[in-house]
Image: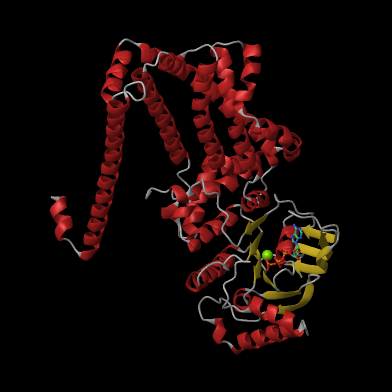
Amino acid sequence: MTAPLISLRNVGKWFKDGRVVALEDITLDIAPREFVSLVGPSGCGKTTLLRLMNGLLQPDTGTVLVRGEAPTPNSDLAMVFQSARLLPWRSVLGNIEFVLALRGLSRTARRERSLGLLGAVGLRDFAEAFPHELSGGMQQRVGLARALAVEPDVLLMDEPFAALDAMTRETLRAELLKLWARRGTAIVFVTHDIDEAIFLSQRIVLLRPRPGAIETTLTVDLPEPRWETDPRADPRFAALRADLWNRIHAMSRDGAELEELAYAFDPGTTKGI
Amino acid sequence: MSDSNTETARPIHDSTARAAKARTRKRVLLWSSWIGITLLLLVSMEVLNAVAGKLVMPSPVDVVREGVGMTLDGTIPRALGQSLTVLVLGYLLAAVTGIGIGIFLGGLPFAGRVFDPFVNAMNSTPGAAFIPLIIVWFGLYTEAKIVVVWNAALFPILINTAAGIASANRDLTEMAQSFGAGRWSLFWQVMVPDALPSILSGLRIGAAISTVGTVIAELTMAQSGLGGLLVAAGNRFQMDKYFAVVFVLMALGTAITASLRYAERRLGRWRVSMSEDH
Ligand SMILES: Nc1ncnc2c1ncn2[C@@H]1O[C@H](COP(=O)(O)OP(=O)(O)OP(=O)(O)O)[C@@H](O)[C@H]1O
Ligand SMILES: [Mg+2]
């Protein structure tokens, strides 16, 4: 067994002097090159977990280690957000060069690598465009290219496709899987969409809310590569899906809360939470 | 030749040609309304002049004659030069100090909170209230007038700058931090550019106030510049001269606002709300 890339031990995190317990007793390892999805209802602490992993937040209990050290935003992790979060006053190229400048690359190295990554996400012709001239899907591609530009060992992705239309989402999922297979970065992927989680990941971590904790972890045993044939036709896909659904339903006996959960997990709802 | 093409081309060209034609029609309508209203105002001036006499309202013809005369004999150019000196120096001083202090107060939240009540108190006091003090401290001449303009324009610029930085987009700052931006680059490369639209609108408000401040200073302190000409003409009931100066001030204010709007559009061209099609 390889040493974990990210290792969380009994991690707890609270806000407002302990009045909001966001996460409690989270123990989780992420291996190199692994694709792990975090799913769970709104407010169960998924974003908080990502922030803990890249050192934007410090845990209140337990330890978070990345390659055996406490993470700082300078370690080899990179974030992709639900909205692309591009600097609107910089060109597409300028946005990627911005993060490379933060890592201290020389001007020529920045330019070269940025152009290469724009090529990788199919946006080389848009290098000089400004973000508002791009569609949502293209902006999200830039966000992905920017994260890949720092050559991270781990990509932390917080519902990156949630705000996109179904068609674009489908394309980007396949592209992400190809990039992942080629580059061998580990990916921690937050989503509300069970199908998306099964389609993309090797392992699914289901979280439960109030306080946020790990409900269960499931291994996704579907053939690779998944972008060539649609794994949704596989009976194992349906079985996993049913399993996850049952667990989500079992998570709460309270009818009202169940409805809320079901709503949060309905892939048909476009959410802007 | 391209004209005949668009006339006979396929529907898609047809519709763009139609849109262009509609735009032209709108522009013609706009300009003819402006010219019409101006003519109407001039005619009303003329009528009022005929009915009530030139003490109440000068004839536009006399106004133009006086305006040309005062321009040719150097009166207006000299006054304009004096006014512009006060206005430009006072405004530049306000812009530099306002943006500087605003960046400081916006970037250091604690300092911002400490100074907030004082800045607000100063900002809520009418600029004219400080004129006697400025006269005592700086006298009656150009330096003092520059201080009046600076004092009037400083606070809108300062407050807009500080507010723009303090309310920087949290999503963008978190993004930059997650990529390892330190305080320095976070501030100068994310928060300050993000505040640029706010800074620019502060500069535009400051410019408008500077014009007011200049004329008030020239009216109330040692008379000079365009404000001085206003008083001189008014005191002697030379309404034609008076109106000639008023029109010059109008043109000056419009030119300043227009050029700042232009600068705002140039610098903010990345903003969606300011894209070409406006
Ligand atoms: N900065 C903060 N201050 C106070 N409470 C916070 C803060 N950040 C998160 N929380 C709380 O912690 C809990 C988990 O929040 P988090 O954003 O991690 O949830 P999430 O799983 O990402 O939800 P969503 O699916 O809606 O994005 C919530 O109850 C939230 O109110
Ligand atoms: Mg979240």
B114 relative position to B90: left or right:
right
* Observer-nearest of B12 and A133: B12
Q: Is residue B123 above or below residue B84?
A: below
Q: Give x and y (percent) for residue A263.
A: 65, 78
- Tell me if residue A106 can be seen: no
Q: Is residue A169 above or below residue B69?
A: below
Image quarter for ligand 2 equals: bottom right
* Observer-nearest of A143 and A109: A143
A111 relative position to B236: left or right:
right
Q: Give x and y (percent) for residue B267.
A: 47, 39
- Tell me if residue B113 can be seen: yes
Residue at point 27% right, 33% down?
Answer: B43
Furthest residue toward front:
B51
Q: Give x and y (percent) for residue B137.
A: 66, 13
Q: Is residue B97 above or below residue A220?
A: above
Residue at point 74% right, 84% down?
Answer: A255
Q: Is residue A218 above or below residue A147?
A: below
* Observer-nearest of B61 and A40: B61
B119 relative position to A64: left or right:
left
Residue at point 13% right, 54% down?
Answer: B4
Q: Give x and y (percent) for residue A53.
A: 74, 59
Residue at point 74% right, 51% down?
Answer: A72
